[in-house]
Amino acid sequence: MNLELTETQTLIRDTARKFARERVAPQARTFDREETFATELYRELASLGLMGVNISAKYGGAEAGVVAYSLAMMEMSAACASTSVTMAVTNMCAELIHTYGNDAQREKFVTRLTSGEAVAGSFALSEPHAGSDPRAMRTTAVRRGDTWVLNGSKQWITSGEYAGVMVVWAQTGGQGGKGISAFIVEGGTPGLHVGKHEDKMGLRASNTVSLTFEDCAIPADNLLGKEGDGFKLAMIALDGGRIGIASQACGVARAALDASVRYAKDRKAFGQAIGEFQGLSFMMANMATELEAAELLTLRAASLKEEGKPFTREASMAKLFASEMSNRAVDKAVQIHGGYGYIDEFPVERYFRDARVQTIYEGTSEVQRLVIARETFKLFG
Ligand code: CAA
């Protein structure tokens, strides 16, 4: 067992860390307050290879692997979770097309995502009535000549207003999951309407919208994978996506711990630094221990994926543990800061709001437990 990072992994982590600290962190509070979708910043991320960390160099990626991706996500998330979720979904879309698309699709769409030309990618699976149960989706795609015509609505679509490239799922006929196919849709396609901009509790600088497809015709060539394979592709992509969100949770928790330790060393009460009180120092001891456990689970899932081994169970475990850990960490961080944790002069109130969605998106904690239970029943007994 080797827990040392490779040269490439160290390079990607350090590149992401430098950019996150110098370019992202100083703007994170303003981005959050003003709900800024930082288009130019995302293009800079792309220029560093961070919009295609696990994509081959041939298609503009960093070709650095999944562990490097997870490390980069942790760094970006410690600075700004809104930035990191945009990065996560873009990497997820690029990887999905890279792995399951054909050469022409890779050439046309993956390079646009990795280069920043597309600004961001969107993953359009959820619908107003179908979140945890995507098989219940109602959006349809009907083949007409050289096109597929899409009709329906999608909900909670990250970067949906700005994404140049989207992967969209729709019913194409057939039973259950077998009737769902995946399509690549370009932003701005006629018949694709961007709906309500969600006013969210956290991740306020990430863009979340609904999308409506009204006789939206896309080229037949934009079918991703085979007709009827869409549900499986979604599940595979989400397995990888969950490593991204677990990494995000680790990054936010690390930032919360860092802020807490700094504050606890500085703030005095009853004649001493508050960090010297056992009640508070034990909170930070727990935060640090749980953070390391979550990082190890996350990097283990990333490493399995990188080695081409099954990782569904490990990705769900990492996502479940890291997201719940991060919510405990941000809660304690606010508590340690006292009243100052409740105002936006200190960053922990943003971490608190940003962490909350981590047990919900890319599969709720309940969905993760369902996946883990199913996989555990296959492995044990
Ligand atoms: N890898 C490969 N194939 C898989 C798979 C996986 N991880 N999981 C399931 N499948 C396959 C199954 O083998 C099965 O194939 P066959 O029909 O050939 O046997 C098929 O898919 C159906 O599988 P299930 O019976 O397990 O499907 P289910 O309907 O019971 O659903 C579920 C399982 C785990 C609950 C799934 O629906 C799920 O993950 N739901 C949560 C959805 C989710 O995470 N949404 C997040 C939206 S995206 C987002 O949040 C992005 C963002 O913007 C940040």
Image (tube, helix red, strand yellow):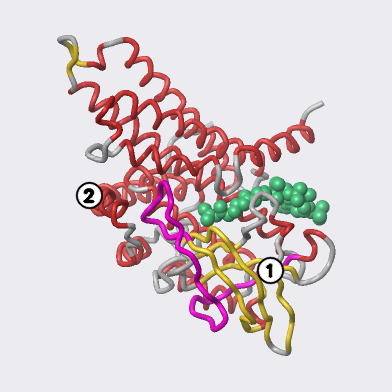
In the picture, residue 365 is in which quadrant?
Answer: top right
Seen from the viewer's position, the closer of residues 86 and 35 is: 35
Task: Identify the residue under disc 1.
Answer: 139
Residue 123 - label: none
Task: Identify the residue under disc 2.
Answer: 26
Q: Amino acid at mark 2?
A: Pro
Seen from the viewer's position, the closer of residues 217 and 43 is: 217
- Disc 1 crowd rating (10 Å Cα; few below 14, some 14-19, many 20+) is many
> Where are the magenta residues, as a range?
180-208
- Relative to 93, is 189 above or below? below
- Relative to 352, is 239 above or below? below
- Relative to 269, is 89 above or below? below
Q: Residue furthest left?
A: 271
Tell me, yes or no, whether the two marked residues, 2 and 1, touch with CB atoms within 8 Å: no
For this view, does 112 lie left or right of residue 179? Answer: left
Q: Amino acid at mark 1?
A: Thr
- Residue at image point 81% right, 70% down: 173
